[in-house]
Image (cartoon, coloured by chain):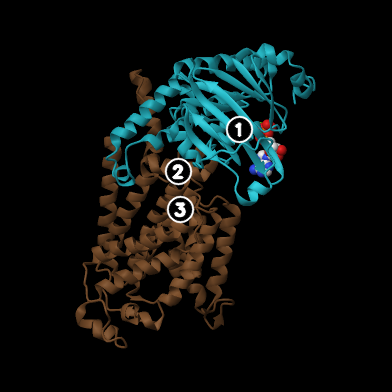
Chain colours: A cyan, B brown
Amino acid sequence: MSESALRLDNITMQFGGVTAVDSFSMNVDKGEIVALIGPNGAGKTTAFNCITGVYTPTNGAVYLFDKKIVANHPKGKALKTYGGTSRDFEKDIIVQSPDKITKLGIARTFQNIRLFKNETVFDNVLVAKHMRAHQNVVTAMLRLNFREEERMRRETADLLHMQDLYQYKDEIADSLPYGLQRRLEIARALATDPKVLLLDEPAAGMNPNETAELSEFIRKIKDEYNLSILLIEHHMDFVNQIADRIYVLDFGKKIAEGTPDEINDNPAVIEAYLGVDDNA
Amino acid sequence: MDKKKQIIISIVLIIALFAGLWITERLVGTNSMLIVVLKKAVIYALLVASINLLQGFSGLFSLGEAGFMLLGAYTYAIFTIPEAVKGNVYQYYNGGLIHVNLPVWLALILGGLVAAFFAFLIGFVVLKLKSDYLAIATLGFAEILRAVFQWDALGGITNGSNILRSFPGFKSVLYPFVVVGLCMTAMMLLINSSYGRAYKAIRDDEIAAEAMGINLFKTKLQAFVISSFFAGIGGGLLAMYQLTVKASTFTSGLSDELLLIAVIGGIGSMTGSVIASFLYVAANEWWLRFLDQPAFIGTFQVPLLRSGFRKVVFSVIIMVIVLFYQQGLMGTREFSIVGIYEKLTGLKKKKKVKASGGGTEK
Ligand SMILES: Nc1ncnc2c1ncn2[C@@H]1O[C@H](COP(=O)(O)OP(=O)(O)O)[C@@H](O)[C@H]1O
Ligand SMILES: [Mg+2]
């Protein structure tokens, strides 16, 4: 049997009257690349934000390697106005801030690239090493943590070499071309030593050549770092190339799941999404 | 240039600075304008740098610098007034309640710790909320503190609305320079450490910083506590400089003044803070003084020169600086002697490399 790396159980996320994600369940097995697709506003990014602790879901749970890391159910007013389809309520409440989720081993990139714009490529990656360093503010100030500092810098340099970014290490992040910024953001996520990687529209704004390169890159890092990957994407070509399985969201609800072939032939998907237009 | 050489140059420069100060003090006298201005300026440099640590490197906005200075100044004064004169100072409060005397350096550190402790309490409550609340909370804190310290019921400790005095001041200009030098070094080391990188990450993008595993609350609280510690030490030094302490002088106007200097120097540049502090204090206290004095050329009175004119000119200068240097004098750059040395000797070096045909490591 395959091992589940990331599982969403009946996740609902409601903003006032808007149910952005509605009773959504999904699973990513260890070593899989799974895509989450759907039209704009379908709730894909919101699902990411529920996993990573940016939002606390209104109902449902998230499991990382079968350990419950996020859980919530509606109470009081939220229960009265609850708009989710499924009224199967999660029992526990587990709320964690995004930094805790990162520490547990889920890293992400953002739909609109969020680099530390005015810092160098090297420092952008180096920052990710801070959370696991054994030091405190006094040892750091007195430079008694020099071994840790050395280790952080060495690991950062190694990572940049592996990702072919070392030559840009002294460039300011903002000055890099768009494609490299995307890759730097992925490298920075890798620097947190994740088990699961979430990519929010990594191919946005890329041409077919760059997209092909990107899919190769993602496969490569998946193997090198032993990752399980969940990615959001609009380009169907890209998704078909790279995904083992696909989930389709529409208005917050899951309307289909399956292999790329199954999804491409699914009438509901074609109506909701594929038929409309490719660049949605 | 290798590390060793850098360190040697830095040490030589520091020794030269202190030797220069020592000689100057001998030549012009401890009470000369130059020395007085240097003392005040170096204390301001520390205070402004502590604001910059918070605002420029962590992106947190506090308006309560004066409150933390007050805590540092009072702590220092209360614990260093000699027993012999306590009866005199606390004449309305039976010689005061606190009869512990500490060495100067320990009282300064204690002042920093008291300020840091209150910063911790405020930060613990406020920093879970949006960052903007910190500005409001610290402003309120400073105002309340000013009132509380003048409260009669606490007179046994604070001397109520009367001044505290008769505590030790600076014997030499070197003292504040040494203390501030140590504090600034600590701050620079912090900024260039792993923690400094975490502060900057939060300043640049909170959401991305969190996604990198940086705990916003803890890290912000830490920056705020450390900044307030140095504000407390600065307050203690200011007490030593003024030789009296009075709660009513620690106004929000003082906080604003220091914030303004930080802006002039460049938010995000520590050396900018230092340079701006010296220029600001020297201009305000010294160079522009003549504008306040009526002057006569023969029997002709020079127009405009009268009490208060200095403030007008000074405000205009500051407006011009803020308008034309929107990033402050230094932006986010740091001034470094070593850097200048490298620039000056850069040409020579390049030639050498060519001549030897070797690839020297950069
Ligand atoms: N913080 C928020 N407050 C209110 N509505 C939100 C918030 N975040 C997302 N939404 C809404 O949720 C829906 C899904 O958005 P999103 O998850 O960004 O879609 P996408 O699938 O394009 O990534 C949209 O209607 C959006 O307006
Ligand atoms: Mg989105």
Say which amino acid is labelled 2.
Answer: Asn
Kindly identify which residue carries mark 1: A10
Q: How far apart are labels 2 and 3 at the CA level?
A: 16 Å
Kindly identify which residue carries mark 3: B54
Say which amino acid is labelled 1.
Answer: Asn
Which of these two is toward me, B272 or A8?
A: A8
Question: Which residue is rendered at x = 53% and y = 17% of the image?
Answer: A32
The image quarter in which residue B147 lies: bottom left
A61 lies above or below A241: below
A4 lies above or below B348: above
Q: In front: mark 2 or mark 1?
A: 1
Q: In front: mark 3 or mark 1?
A: 1
Kindly identify which residue carries mark 2: B215
Q: Position of residue B197 (x, y in %)?
A: 43, 40
Q: Is residue A263 left or right of residue B96?
A: right
Q: Position of residue A115 (x, y in %)?
A: 54, 34
* Subunit bearing disc 2: B
Q: Callout 2: 10 Å neighbours few (<14), some, many (20+)?
A: some
Q: How far apart are labels 2 and 1 at the CA level?
A: 28 Å
Q: Of the two numbered discs 2 and 3 on the same chain, state the one appearing first in sequence.
A: 3
Q: State the SS at label 2.
A: loop
Say which amino acid is labelled 3.
Answer: Leu
Task: Tell me if residue A113 can be seen.
Answer: no
